Image (cartoon, helix red, strand yellow):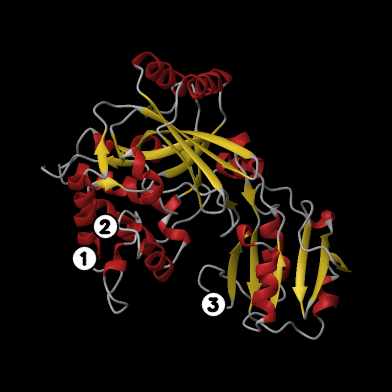
Amino acid sequence: MVQVRPFRAIRPKSNLASQIAELPYDVIDTNEARNLAKDNPYSYFHIDRSEIAFDDQMNPYAKEVYQKANEVLQQFLAEGWFVKEDKPCFYLYELTMAGRTQTGIAANTAIEDYVNDLIKKHEFTRPAKEEDRMNHIRYCDANTSPIFLSYREPEAMQQIVQAWKVQHAPIYDFEKYHQVHHRLWVIDDLAVIEQITAIFEQVNALYIADGHHRAASAVKVGLEKRENQTASAESEYFLSIIFPENELHILEYNRVINIVPPADFFQRLAEYFTVTPTTQIKAQQKGEFKLYYNQQWYTLTFNEALRPNDAVNGLDVAVLQKYVIEGIFGITDVRVDSRIDFVGGIRGSEELVRLVDSQKWQVAIAMYPTSMHDLLAVADAKQIMPPKSTWFEPKLLSGLLIHDLETRSK
């Protein structure tokens, strides 16, 4: 059973929340962050992408960059732009996009639960990306970005969440990026906090939806602090926002390939797919793909008799990898091969057309989204999904909640 506990968040003053909150550090590049923050001294990118304080020649992984992140964090606190909660609380974070609403509980989750696989994973992580966020945590002495978790929500929790939202006013209420409406409530009633804590004690597992690198980095820093005897009660936990799995929305994660298809391309595709020209640009069901090549869309319908009865190998992304990306184009490691790239569904199939018509890419393939059912099945089986299997929307904004590890003086 999982350990979930309240914490004393560092968070924006209510009138500054919309100006501070920003997209996650890993969905934009340095130049995008610099442009978004240049006229906004409150932007969280000054902390989360602190390399924007330097010129383009600066190594974004230099210690001066992480020192700058902490310097700006301390400045935000000194100016009163950030405040720290007086007592441990839970928080409700609601996001509404295109008429769909999801509400998560922001809380501390336990390093021990991650180590013991009660917080389940479905992706591999890369050491270089881990080290970047580990340094950010070390220098700031804080979990500066939340991990996006999911769970099978008990009905009792749903009732508590809905009742609190109805009976209390949110402290933040604003719209930002892609017309997403963000609201956040503080749960500071001790009796309700105890109820939430007790319900989580009956939950069998939590699942990482998004943020595997952030989670691994937070855990490794916590274990490191144990090892060097600088741990605190806070550093045994890390910042998460936990959403019911049935409220989450996964978009497709599309592919573009920069290899000229072989002369027998369509004949080889026909060994595994029914191939038909189409005017549709979005896959409608599992087993269906949309191919854009030479200014024409095609529907590829997979031969289901070939689909493995396996949580991972039966996924559409695995089928595409085996029969097309590797089988036809010869790309075996999509993590490092520069001849393939990935386009989040939020950009739409129109972005695939633009990329191919620009002749920077030769072929685009639009996917049908992986389901939450498939994600949980892979995690429960202790297996790993193929790279770039899921794109969650809406994105949780960073800068609304920070978890202080309270080990700086140790």
> Looking at the rendered structure, which numbered label has been put on residue 98?
none
Q: CA distance from mark 3 to mark 2?
A: 27 Å
Instruction: Count residues near mark 3 (Cα–Cα under 10 Å), then give few for <14, some for 14-19, many for 20+.
Output: few
Provide residue 101's location: percent of width, then percent of height: 59, 37
Question: Looking at this rendering, what residue extends furthest in the left direction?
Answer: 409
Residue position marked by numbered label 2 in the rendering: 135
Question: If the image is split into quadrants, where does the C terminus sit?
Answer: top left
Query: Helix, strand or loop at disc 3?
Result: loop
* Discs 2, 1 touching: Cβ within 8 Å: yes
User: What's the amino acid at mark 1?
Assistant: Lys
User: What's the amino acid at mark 3?
Assistant: Ser
- Kindly report which numbered mark, 3 or 1, lies closer to the viewer in this rendering: 1
Residue position marked by numbered label 1 in the rendering: 63
Q: CA distance from mark 3 to mark 1?
A: 28 Å
Provide residue 315's location: percent of width, then percent of height: 69, 53
Q: CA distance from mark 2 to mark 1?
A: 8 Å
> Looking at the rendered structure, which numbered label has been put on residue 338?
3
Instruction: Count residues near mark 2 (Cα–Cα under 10 Å), then give few for <14, some for 14-19, many for 20+.
Output: some
